[in-house]
Image (cartoon, helix red, strand yellow):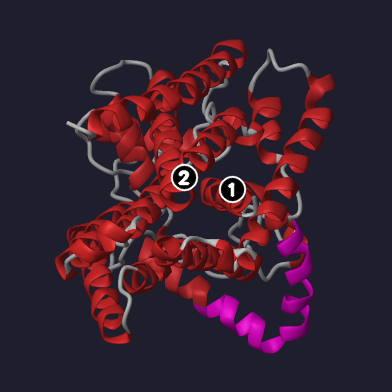
Amino acid sequence: MPQRPERARLGASLAGPLLVTLLLRLVVIVAFAPPPSWDGTIYAALARSLASGQGYVHWDGSGRATAFFPVGYPAAIALALRVVRSTDVAVWAVNVVASIVGCALVRWTAARLAGPRAGRRAAWAYALYPSLVLFSAAAMTETLQSTLLIATLALVVAAHPASEQQARTTLEGRSFVAAALAGVVLGLACFVRPQAIVLAPVVGALCGTTVRRRVGLAFVATAVVLALAAPWAARNARALDAPTLYSTNGGSNLLIGTLASARGGYRELTARDPCGLVAGEVRRDRCMTRAALARIAEAPAAWLALAPRKALKVLGYEWSAVSYLRSSSASFPQRIATPLAVVCTLAWWTLVALATRAFAARRRVAPEAREGARATRWFTAAAAASVLVVHVAFIADDRYHLVLVPLLIVLGAATLETEK
């Protein structure tokens, strides 16, 4: 009974941000109604083949099995197509639902770390963050992936007590359950963007408080992630020319990342490029990986020279959310593109500055919340490092950092509260 007023206050404080999260995204969708564009055209085609019962088959209409693009986001759209008939509406539904869940999780995690005011700040920041609002209309993976990552962090934080009373009553089983559940959510994230797999041992380790416990839980989370991937890997072994864990585009992205003509970003490969005529997705992927590594070994300085450009593309600015609408929607006013991109970039720099201060403010956190705050800092740092390292090595674009935004919002909101 005493918990009911607290839950009522929590619901009241969350209602406003959730409503704004929903309304702003609906405004963008209704105003611009962008059809799937960029990679989204392929995600939409893959989702339609799944929803129609054809299976995960190539978007060229040949009917052959594929695993080139990760299956997670098309599968989510296909589930929405069971309720709605339009692929466009299904895309928007997935993104809006993911946004609402993301807002709630950001609010809960920040409140757990630094109190109700931090939670409210975080929820409003998420609701209003311009690129998240704009990109919710895009048939791209970042909105869903960002929600899966903040859900993973919420489970990690839940493994640690939030009060002195909880610290006295917490059992070891709590951290085991949290590590296993975090592994489940992270395992789903790996189907959306496979590079998330590098976070599996980090997630488990952050649920523990002793070295022995952290090592054990790292194995638990990693085992759960791999167990979830096993059926898909088995499917790929049956349907493709060789086994592969998640997708078969890693080799092509690594190869593109070595090409000076790509300038650190994406360039479509042709038959003239290495391995373009190799048959079989997995064999071609492995051939391109070998070709890319050979190019790096032959001219490491040329490859490293692209690193600063790639790092700038990943972390320096925000343009993709505006660019997507600009290129795909006939109703988008072109004259506002640059000013809107400036607003998005300023929001990103502000968020990075606030989150960076969290590492300097760690000693101001209440003693009973220190483990959760420590886990939040390390998970966010690991996620940011994985995004930067992977895309500096492969190909870069500013949309890739959007998956970090909810994590940084939590850190920033908690920092503002603990510095008071």
Residue tagged 1: 417
206 vs 116, nearest the viewer? 116
Task: Rate crowding at label 1 as few (under 14), some (14 to 19) or many (20 or more) other CA atoms within 10 Å.
Answer: many
Q: Which mark is residue 306?
A: none
Could you say where residue 375 lies in the image, as x and y percent from the top left?
43, 66
User: In which image quadrant can residue 164 be found?
Assistant: bottom left
Horizontal side of 283 relative to 253 (left or right) equals left
**Residue 195 visible, this orientation:** no
Disc 1 vs disc 2: Cβ atoms closer than 8 Å?
A: yes
Q: Main secondary structure of the magenta part?
A: helix
Q: Which mark is residue 115?
A: 2
311 vs 269, nearest the viewer? 311
Residue 205 colored in magenta in the image? no
**Residue 43 visible, this orientation:** yes
Q: Which region is colored magenta?
A: 290-312
Q: Does dot 2 land on a helix, a strand or a loop?
A: loop
Amino acid, disc 1: Glu
Horizontal side of 118 relative to 231 (left or right) equals right
User: In which image quadrant can residue 229 be found?
Assistant: bottom left
